[in-house]
Every structure is written in C-alpha cells, then in structure tokens.
Image: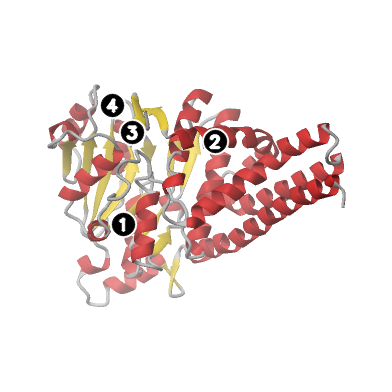
Amino acid sequence: MSSAWIATLALLSLNGSYLWQMLRFRGPWQRQMASGGRVGGQPLVAAVAAAETSGAPEEAETPGFSIIIAARNEAENLPNLLRDLQQQNPVSGGIELIIVDDHSTDNTARIVTEAAQELPFPVRLVQLAQVPGAPTGKKAAVQAAVQVARAPWVLLTDADCRVPAGWVQAYAELVATDAAARFISGPVLLTGTGWLATLQGLELAGLVGVGAASIGRNRPTMCNGANLAYRRADFFAVNGYQGNEAVPSGDDEFLLHKLHAAFPGSIRFLAQQAALVRTAAQPTVRRLLRQRVRWASKWRHYQTSAPQQLAVLVLLSNLTFPVGLGLWGFGVVSGVGVLSAWAIKLLADVVFLRPVLRFLGRPEWLWWVPVLQLAYGPYALATGLLGLRGSYEWKDRRLGAK
C-alpha cells in the first residue's frame, strides 16, 4: 500500500472515530433533554407539588441554597447580577448570598455592602485580604465561602454572569426530586455580537453539549464554574481542592471528577431553560486566548483518563484539515481524501451541535460551523501548547508556572 493511501486512511479513520464519538454523545444529550424536566415520569413542577402535599417537612423537599460568587474588580458587572438575584422566584428554605472579594482594587466591596441593605435575603461579604495568609484566586474564594455557608447546597456563578428569575428554583426542583444528586452542572450561553462572539459561543455550545452528554453516559468530563451546584458536606467529604491547589484553574472540573469518583452515579446535568446562565464573550482575540489558555492549563492535571482522551481526539480531529492541506501540497495525499476527511468532521459537528443549539436558542449558529472548523485547528493547538506551559495572565495576575 502506498504512503498516499496510508496517509489518506489515517485522516479518514481519525475523523471517522470523531464522528462515532459525536454520535455516542448525541444520544445521551437528547435523553438529557427528554428527562431534564421529568422525574419518575412527572414534570418537575408536578413532582415538587406532590412532594409538598405528602406531609413531609418542606425543608427536606427543597432545601435552601447558599449562592457563592467570587469577585475580583467586578464593580461594573456585579450590579446587573445582583438585580437578577433580587428577582429570583422563591424557593423553600430561601437563599443566602456570599460574595468573596478577591483583593479587588475597585468598588466591589462597597457595592456588596450597599446591596446587603436592600436585597430581600441575607448577604455576606468575605474579603480574602482579611483571611489568614491572604490567599488569592477563585479556589481560595470558593473555599472561604463554603466554610461560612449555612445551606446544605451551594450554588455558584460568576460575577459577570446574568441569571434568569427561575435559576435557583430550577436547581431546587431537581434537588427536591432526586435524592441521589450530589453535583449538578448547568448550561451556559455566551452572548455578544459579531463574528468573534459567535465563534466563541459556538465553541462553548459544543463544550456544554459534550459535558452534558458525558454526564448522561455516567462518565463526566467537563462542566462550567459559571453554573453549578453541589452539596456543601460533599465538598468537605472529598477534601475540597486538596491535591490540585497549585493549579490556578479547575475549581469546577477537578471537584466534578473527585465527586464522581467518591459518589458514582450522583452527577446531574440540569437540562432546563430556566437554569440557563448567560455571560458575555471575550471582546478581543487577545483576551480570548488568555481565557482559553487558562482553561487548557488544567487538562494535564486531570486524574482520570476520559477527559484527556477526549481532548486529544478533538485536537487531532481539528488538525486533520490544516495538516491534510499541507500533505496535499507535498503530494502525499489526494485532494479528494482531504475534503472527504473534512466532510466527515463537518458532519459530526453538525449532527451533534444541531440539538444543542436548539436548546440554547441559537440554531442559526449552525451556519458558522465550517468557519469555526477552519480556524479551530491552529487555535486549539496554540492554546493547548501554551496551556501545557502552565503560565498565563488573568485578572491582572501572572498565574501558574514561572
């Protein structure tokens, strides 16, 4: 067999494997959507109503939540999120809000203090600068907040996010009807206008879909710290972030993997429109690359193989087109082989992303899939390599390896 045939078969086989993986994810995603609003055949709201009339204590059915927000120099964004939280639908047990000020140099602390006088639920400000040792970073902020939280469940989002009025209620309904749940991942949508925001939103939609599907397969790989909840007691049961404290990012996925290992079958994805959190896309390519390098910096520290294997497959599949073009230029593979491999990759992404984008309310983004594919290979390789270096700048700090 000639080298040209071998190279062509390698490209086709790689993207064939990627297509098979996306088909395996599509089924669990659709099952998540079908069951996301139902428990035991009942809609969640009906199930909660039935529970509330069963004579059981109300607090046991829908426990209260401690909402945790880590904030560093978020004076511009926090007022929007605080208004959203003020409009939350009531839940049994109520909520408390804990905002951790991570050494801000703007008016973040003052905004929280003023809001505490007007919001209809308890608000606490924790300032990391006053914590012994003055730790920094999101993990330290979350750790400090969990230490003082009073509710059995903690619910996390970011200071630059927007949440719908039914956000807490959606989590409360799932908790009330699924006693086995210990960690709940919620959907996130990127907002913004223009080609850069659209491509970022499409990329994140894929990550959200894969994260939900992997949870549906009971092999959780990823989640998003902008929208998740877990039992406070379980955070301490797995020793929180112990073992990965030195990794600045990963406050969400490392905990996900630890809880899955300690409590198999307890991870859930909240497939509810009412739980959809929105956050703005990065406004410039420079800031986008910084964020994605931060995300990529944690993957080599995973203790489970599933997310690493998936990351490698996705990277290699996205590189088949630019690499194939190079091989075609040197006469190593045929142009038909390169285009066929690209068509398989395109088919895989369209088949998987179509239902995900429908759920997110962005079906028109499907037209951008070919554009994202053309740019994604070099972009993913660059961020992956920079992430391996472990050093990056975020929130005006130089983080990671020196």
Which residue matches tag 4? 75
Select label 2 or label 4 by which is in front.
Answer: 2
Q: Earlier in the sequence, mark 3 or mark 4?
A: 4
Cα distance between the residues tagged 4 and 1: 27 Å
Q: Position of residue 36 (x, y in %)?
A: 47, 62
The numbered mark at residue 278 is none
Tell me if I can see residue 169 in this picture: yes
Q: Earlier in the sequence, mark 3 or mark 2?
A: 3
Tell me if I can see residue 97 in this picture: no
Cα distance between the residues tagged 2 and 1: 27 Å
Instruction: Please say if 77 is above or below 356.
Output: above
Local packing at callout 2 (Cα closer than 10 Å; few below 14, some 14-19, many 20+) is some
Which residue matches tag 3? 80
Which residue matches tag 1? 230
Select label 3 or label 2 by which is in front.
Answer: 2
Q: Position of residue 119 (x, y in %)?
A: 20, 40
Local packing at callout 4 (Cα closer than 10 Å; few below 14, some 14-19, many 20+) is many
Which residue matches tag 2? 200
